[in-house]
Image (cartoon, rainbow, N blue to C red):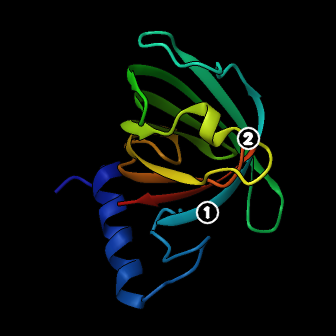
């Protein structure tokens, strides 16, 4: 049997599991040192979200991400396109990119979004959430799968829970 990179990682993973190593951000560690789950807090730094969503007219949002200790962890950028818009909200398709210090995670989704007039108010904003499927990554996240839940707490603040398989 030839020991290539993939087999070496499998052996390392089995060895780590056998001795019960658990460490890392927010969850059990993997043999490659990456956490299976991490939570990041986002602060919106840019957006071109229109007051009225129009099917086929894209918008973007950009957030600065911080870890649980408040340290800069990276950025979150999403390109979103409304597919349908009605009185109860909009169906949005979106692509997400997380640029982190040790690599990039990509994700995509389709979700129901409350209309901006309901969620973008400064006083007593409507909180809402949506789920992305992780489609891959680079660096330490090469070949990543899993999900990202984004909880929108206010116009400028969100919380991301990244869960890797």
Residue 159, horizontal then vertical, whole percent: 63, 56
Q: Pick the quarter of the image with the N terminus.
A: bottom left
Residue 108, horizontal then vertical, whole percent: 40, 35
Q: Is residue 100 left or right of residue 57?
A: right
- Front in this rendered view, residue 128 or 16: 128
Is residue 65 placed above or below 75 in the rendered structure?
Answer: below
Circle 2 packing at 10 Å, graded few (<14), some (14-19), many (20+), is few
- Front in this rendered view, residue 13 or 79: 79
Is residue 80 placed above or below 4 in the rendered structure?
Answer: above
Dot 1 and dot 2 residues touching (CB under 8 Å): no
Secondary structure, mark 2, is loop
Residue 154 visible in image: yes
Identity of the residue drawn at 31% across and 68% down: 11
Identity of the residue drawn at 41% across and 28% down: 92
Secondary structure, mark 1, is strand
Is residue 37 placed above or below 41 in the rendered structure?
Answer: below
Circle 1 packing at 10 Å, graded few (<14), some (14-19), many (20+), is many
The residue tagged 2 is 121
Is residue 132 placed above or below 71 in the rendered structure?
Answer: above
Residue 33 visible in image: no
The residue tagged 1 is 39
Residue at the outermost left position? 1
Q: Is residue 43 left or right of residue 133?
A: right
Residue at the outermost bottom position? 19
């Amino acid at each position: 049997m030839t020991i290539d990179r993939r087999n070496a990682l499998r052996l390392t993973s089995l060895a780590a599991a056998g001795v019960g190593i658990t460490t890392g951000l927010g969850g059990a560690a993997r043999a490659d040192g990456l956490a299976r789950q991490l939570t990041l807090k986002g602060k919106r730094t840019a957006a071109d979200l229109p007051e009225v969503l129009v099917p086929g007219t894209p918008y973007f949002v950009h957030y600065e991400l911080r870890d649980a200790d408040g340290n800069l962890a990276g950025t979150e950028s999403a390109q979103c396109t409304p597919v349908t818009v009605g009185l109860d909200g909009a169906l949005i398709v979106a692509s997400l990119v997380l640029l982190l210090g040790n690599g990039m995670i990509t994700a995509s989704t389709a979700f129901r979004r409350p209309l901006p007039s309901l969620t973008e108010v400064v006083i007593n904003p409507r909180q809402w959430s949506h789920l992305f499927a992780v489609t891959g990554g680079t660096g330490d996240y090469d070949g990543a799968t899993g999900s990202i839940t984004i909880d929108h707490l206010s116009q400028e603040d969100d919380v991301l829970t990244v869960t890797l398989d």
